[in-house]
Image (cartoon, rainbow, N blue to C red):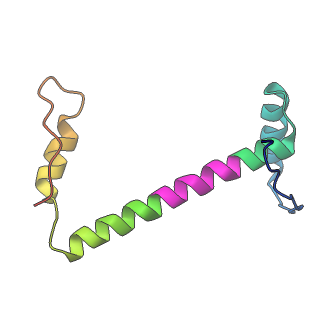
């Protein structure tokens, strides 16, 4: 079954000249249109924001139910990352 194409509609966006030049340069180097480049960038940004919102909602639900990770424990774990004595990921309590 062929892929269903979504109807596209134009959007006008104003960029600072420096950003416009970067979009132009990168899209040329990637051999894609500026429109495709911007569309992909916006899609990636939307997906990132959706992921962040979902993670924040999940964290808020955990906090409201009394589950949390002590800040000092989290910082000790974070500071151990990449060391020879890397700690295990802290768990909710």
Identity of the residue drawn at 37% across and 69% down: 57
Q: Position of residue 18 (x, y in %)?
A: 79, 45
Residue 53 percent across, percent down from the top left: 46, 64
Compare residues 90 and 82 and report the one nearer the observer: 90
Task: Check the image and report above or below for 15 versus 85.
Answer: below
Report which quarter residue 76 is drawn in: top left
Q: Is residue 53 above or below residue 87?
A: below
Q: Quadrant of the N terminus?
A: top right
| Image quadrant assignment for residue 61 | bottom left
How many numbered tags mark residues here?
Answer: 0
Residue shown at the point (22%, 42%) measured from the top left: 78
Tell me where residue 16 appears, x and y as whole percent. 80, 54
Q: Is residue 63 left or right of residue 53?
A: left
Q: Would you say 87 lies left or right of 10 here?
A: left
| Magenta segment | 41-51
> In this picture, is 41 found above or below 62?
above
Residue 75 lies left or right of residue 93; in this view the side is right
Q: Quadrant of the C terminus?
A: bottom left
Main secondary structure found in the magenta portion: helix
Q: Residue furthest top?
A: 84
- Residue 89 at what x, y percent from top left? 18, 43
- Residue sitting nearer the eye, 73 or 46: 46
**Residue at position x 17%, y 35% from top?**
80
- Nearer to me, 61 or 71: 61
Image-based side of 31 in relation to 58, left or right: right
Q: What residue occupies the far bottom of the structure in this picture?
A: 64
View extreme (front): residue: 1
């Amino acid at each position: 079954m062929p892929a269903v194409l979504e109807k596209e509609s134009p959007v006008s966006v104003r960029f600072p000249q420096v950003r416009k030049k970067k979009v132009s340069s990168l899209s040329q180097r990637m051999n894609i249109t500026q429109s495709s480049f911007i569309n992909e960038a916006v899609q990636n940004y939307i997906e990132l924001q959706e992921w962040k919102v979902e993670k924040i909602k999940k964290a808020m639900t955990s906090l409201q139910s009394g589950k949390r990770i002590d800040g000092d424990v989290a910082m000790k774990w974070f500071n151990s990352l990449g060391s020879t004595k890397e700690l295990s990921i802290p768990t909710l309590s």
